[in-house]
Image: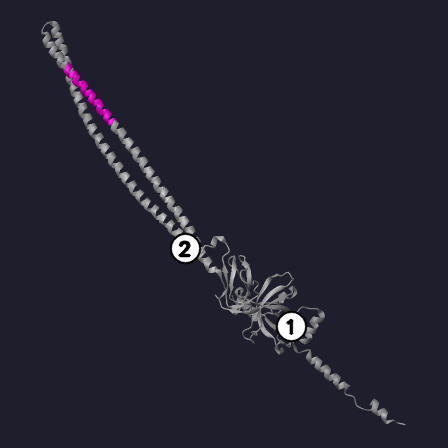
Amino acid sequence: MKLKSFDKIYHIHKQSTVKNWFIFIGILCFVTLFLPWTQNIKVKGTVTTLYQDQRPQQLNSPIPGKILKWYVKNGDFVKKGDTILQLAEVKDDYMDPQLLERTEQQVSAKKGVRDYYEAKVGTTADQIKALGAGRELKLAQLKVKISQLNNKLQAEQAELLAITNELKLSEDQFNRQKKMYDDGLVSLTQLQQRNVSFQNVLAKKTAIDNKLAQTNQEILTVQIEERATIQDYTEKLSKTEGDRFSSLGQIEGSTGEIAKLENQVANYRARRGLYFVQASQDGQIVQLNKGGIGEILKETESIGTIVPSKVDYAVEIFVRPVDLPLLKVGQRVMCVFDGFPAIVFSGWPTTSYGTFAGKVIAVENNINTSGLFRALVIEDKGQKPWPPQIKVGAGVQGIAILNDVPIWYELWRNINGFPPDYYIVKNENKATNDAAAK
């Protein structure tokens, strides 16, 4: 007996559609194998900035001091040059309220001393000229005197020559007169007269000899006086020249002391401007670590941090050494920022939602302590702009875009453990072509 329930439960005579579904799914999978797939590298990173002056900057005390007044609090936004706090001096060397004025007075006094020595140098130069002129005049006088004595000497020598001839003649006459007296030809009176004449001539010759010796002595005395004059004026000139060089040394010493004091004045004036700690740039004040009034700060001690308002954001990503050859300057990187919802299809980056495009601008050649290489990524200006809400230090997941391949190729590559295909960016191709053309 045939039961109706049997036919309804087992559907023995009902036509099945499983085969059609199996064929449809197989065709769909086969077609899917030929769909394009974008190879990529997933890396971790953080938000940073390209420029050092846009990074968070520490606020340091330029001098040791005591806090007098705070002008800001944590979280305040400041402009460049705004006062953050006021300091008071704590060093004994700078506590004099008129320190700058007193130091300027010292500079003026030193300049006065230098002016006096400069005037003395001028006076000494005039003295040297006067001494030189006096020496020349004195020597000229002595030369004239020597010339006069030489003329006198020549006259006396001529007179001596004449008297010598006269003495010779008188001696001959006396000798003849004496012979004649001995022969009895002349009287004794005549002999005595001739003797007197001879003695007078001899006396004249002796007087002329004495005058000649005296003239020679005078010439020698004048020559000695000339040498003494030269020696005397040389000593005076040397002493005056020594005074001049001493004054010049005092001038140089005063100039050095003036420069030192002027340096101190400049330092004191600059130090006065350091009592007010000012913001180095526009930004937000955070992490103030000093509190209260009267707290002592050491030199270069940290006060807090200022976070710049204007920042050109970048992303630093860290790549494994095995993936480093696949990363090049100019390569596209899709960034997923922490805190921003995103739906990521790693093989189809264009269909992903919440990702932001960037490009690699630098790849560092040194490995860090974690065994990774660092690369910098900036915003791709031709794509969707990065969100302004991101902050320095926020986490980022990067997807470095590589080559486009079929899905079957990507499955085959992963099954065999092969690395992704090497990807050459357009700017690198252009550089290669330009080099080949040259």
Mark 1 lies on a secondary structure that is strand
Type of the residue with mark 2: Glu
Does 161 sit above or below residue 386? above
| Outermost residue to the right | 1
- The residue nearer to you, when weighing 128 against 304, is 304
- The residue nearer to you, when weighing 357 against 233, is 233
Q: Which mark is residue 101?
A: 2
Q: What residue is rendered at 33% in x and 38% in y?
A: 239
Q: What residue is rendered at 35% in x and 40% in y?
A: 242
Mark 2 lies on a secondary structure that is helix
Are the residues at dot 1 and dot 2 in contact (C-beta closer than 8 Å)?
Answer: no
Does 92 sit above or below residue 5? above
Q: Is residue 140 left or right of residue 94?
A: left
Nearer the camera: disc 1 or disc 2: 2
* Coordinates of residue 91 in the picture (x, y in percent): 50, 54
Asked whether residue 12 is in view, the answer is: no
Q: CA distance from mark 1 to mark 2?
A: 74 Å
Instruction: Indicate whether residue 216 is drawn in magenta.
Output: yes
Q: What residue is rendered at 41% in x and 53% in y?
A: 102
Q: Is residue 362 left or right of residue 143?
A: right
| Magenta segment boundaries in residue numbering | 199-220
- The residue nearer to you, when weighing 276 against 208, is 276
**Residue annotated with mark 1:** 39
